[in-house]
Image (cartoon, rainbow, N blue to C red):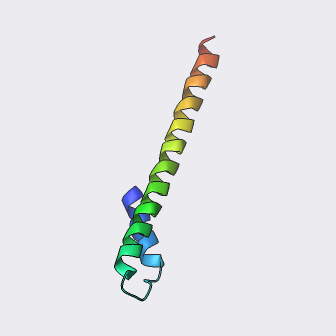
Amino acid sequence: MVNGGVMSGAIQRPAGKGIHAKEISAVECMHTGMKAISGKLQLDLGSSLFEITSSLFISS
């Protein structure tokens, strides 16, 4: 899922003209991937915290 986000982000952005175009797009692609991964981690953490708190309320 994260890989798909990185690929679509790389495809959507037009490649810059110049010597460093490939380097820049690679860095941007990595940055987009990091943002996607950190966003998913936050989402997973939030949902697991919600599950823990709701199970605590149910048990008590």
Residue at x-position 44% and y-position 55%: 34
Relative to 22, is 46 above or below?
Answer: above
Q: Which residue is nearer to you in this view: 28 or 56?
A: 28
Relative to 15, is 8 above or below?
Answer: above
Residue 44 lies left or right of residue 23; in this view the side is: right
Of the 4 image quadrants, the one containing the C terminus is: top right
Residue at x-position 43% and y-position 83%: 15
Of the 4 image quadrants, the one containing the N terminus is: bottom left
Residue at x-position 39% and y-position 81%: 21
Relative to 32, is 51 above or below?
Answer: above
Q: Position of residue 56 (x, y in %)?
A: 59, 17
Quarter of the image where one finds residue 29: bottom left
Can you see residue 1? Answer: no
Can you see residue 31? Answer: yes
Quarter of the image where one finds residue 58: top right
Residue at x-position 41% and y-position 56%: 2
